[in-house]
Image (tube, helix red, strand yellow):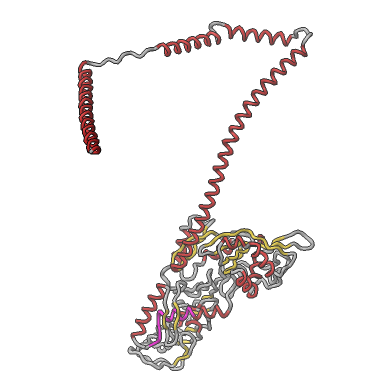
Amino acid sequence: MAFSFGSTTATSQPTLFGSTTTPATSTGFGGFGTSTGGFGSGLGTFGTATTSSTTGAGTGFGFGGFGTTTTAAPSSSLFGTFGTTSASPFSFSATTTTTPSGFGGFGTGTTGFGTGLTSTGTTGAFGGFGGGSAFGTTGSSAFGAPSGASTFGAPSGTGFFGAQPQNAQQQEEANLANVALAISLPQIYGDERDAIIAKWNQLQAYWGTGKGFYSINGVVEFKPENHFCRFKALGYHLIPKGSNELGQVALVLARKEEEVAAAQQQVVDTLHRILGSRPTLSVCVEGIKPLPEDRTEVVIYVLERPVQGPAKRVSANDLFNFLNQPAQKNQIATQLMVESILPKVGWTEEQLKEYLDKPPAGVDPLLWQQAKLDNPDPEKYIPVPMIGFKELHRRLKYQAEQTKLFQQRLDVISGDITQLQTQHSTMLAKLEDYKRKDLELGHRLLKVIVKQEIYRKMGFAIQAEEETLKVQLEQLQAELNHPTQFKGRLNELMSQMRMQTQMSSGRTDSTYQMDSETQAEIRLILKQQQDGLQHLIEIIKEDAADVHLIEQGLAKSRLK
């Protein structure tokens, strides 16, 4: 209702969501008369083509502009978004042109209290709603074909996630409009009970679960993905890396890793049949990784071996577009239990900038800006929204699975390090052995050379060089034999060692001396020990005599 305060709304007029109603009701207050559908014209009117004008001079307050005529162009979006042009609230003829945001949400660039401002958005990072692919490029593909055609003969279409169909887009827009109507202005009873239902719907929308009525026959389901859910947080994710030329595509199978690894050849054969069993194409498995909830990720690429020319990989976008067609997608889902397909393609600088510049749907721009500032490594991570407990739980499972993989890798590295340390110790031992053998061989070689030189010089006169060498050797021999030089010191050390050996062998231990008091204490303790032993001996003798009497008594009783 338009809060007309006593004025009677005109019958047969467009409502908030494009249907025509004839309420012809009157409210309890007068004045302020505008005959617009709910929320006023400045909120986009959810796809209707309403025209509201004020009655009287400056008395209208329909959020459309203070006594001016506000016209909302036909639009199929919520709050005037998704590529529409609408008058913004309090904008004084400001024109706003918007397009899809990074996640295909509102993505609006509306102006507030501005005059004549225009903001224009572009297609989001994930393909947007009805826009072109964020990751698709114009020009030739990897096989020289235009971007509209792929190697497999199917149109390449959009890139990474692709654009949403027109019907899905319209359905989502209508759902957003119904959610907004259910939490703000449900029209069921026409009295104060609608306000109670609106509060209850707000609570369900904030919680992200339940169903809410916005009319007698209209009901909408609240999911955690709705824009009013309060259970939202921001985390960080690795920036996608990869090249389109590598041709890697990830398939998520609803099977355990052991089963997929055991049936890897069957998976390859099935994919080859889906690709048309062409002899020039070969399906290769890049890697297999386990995922939570008994899921497995298989990374594949297709190698094309033409009749002429070198072999090359099919581009990731071409392979993804072919497998994502309805017929092929149904085949791999039925035969291989594939749940999702994703090309391993990285982002360009422009796509990354576009994603960071526009906050996702339902995320406060200030929180998004703060998340970008708190990014621990902007070159490696990007902020991502986490909406609802299921998403948080899913990320927790993936982190636990990734931690398990890291731990397995660390165990493998630890085993390799242990093996390398063992090999290193063995190599050190062998190196010492080789050094010893080298020294022995060096000595043997020196002896051989000496004898060979002796035989070679036999019969020749002593040369001048040999005479000089002889003099030097005699000097060394004299230094070694000199009493005060090395030989004398060695003899002195040998004498000292012999004396220490003789002193240690001939040394006797001296008697330990005790004073008289200590001796008396020791004598008293020994006497007490002796008395105790004597007492025990007497007890044992008495017991032995008693045992002997018992045995005699038993013997007599047996004789009787």
Membership of 335 in magenta stretch:
no
Instruction: Give residue 103's position: percent from left, percent from top.
Output: 53, 70
Q: Quadrant of residue 11?
A: bottom left
Visible in this render: residue 66?
A: no
User: In the image, what residue occupies the spot 33% across and 85% down?
Assistant: 192
Where's residue 50, x and y in %?
49, 86
Closer to us: 437 or 220: 437
Q: In the image, is 5 to the left or to the right of 246?
A: left
Residue bounds of the magenta highlight: 175-188
| Residue at the extreme top of the image, as rendered | 483
Q: Which of the 4 quarters of the picture holds residue 212?
A: bottom left
Q: Using the rendered view, name the quadrant where residue 129 is placed.
A: bottom right
Q: Is residue 67 above or below residue 346?
A: below
Q: Nearer the viewer, residue 148 or 30?
A: 148
Q: Do we see residue 91 in this rendering?
A: yes
Front residue (pair 454, 158) = 454
Where does the N terminus fall, quadrant-wise?
A: bottom left
Is 542 in front, or is 219?
Answer: 542
Residue at image location 23% in from the left, 22% down from the top: 526
Q: How many labels does the image show?
A: 0
Percent of width and height locating residue 293: 51, 65
Q: Point out the image quarter for the C terminus.
A: top left
Which residue extends farthest front?
560
Q: Is residue 551 above or below residue 439?
A: below
Helix, strand or loop for the magenta stretch, by majority: helix
In the shown orientation, is residue 56 left or right of residue 286?
A: left
Residue 296 in the figure: left or right of residue 554: right
From the top left corner, tell me how far across and down residue 364 is, in percent. 44, 68
Q: Residue at x 47, y 58 (%)?
A: 373
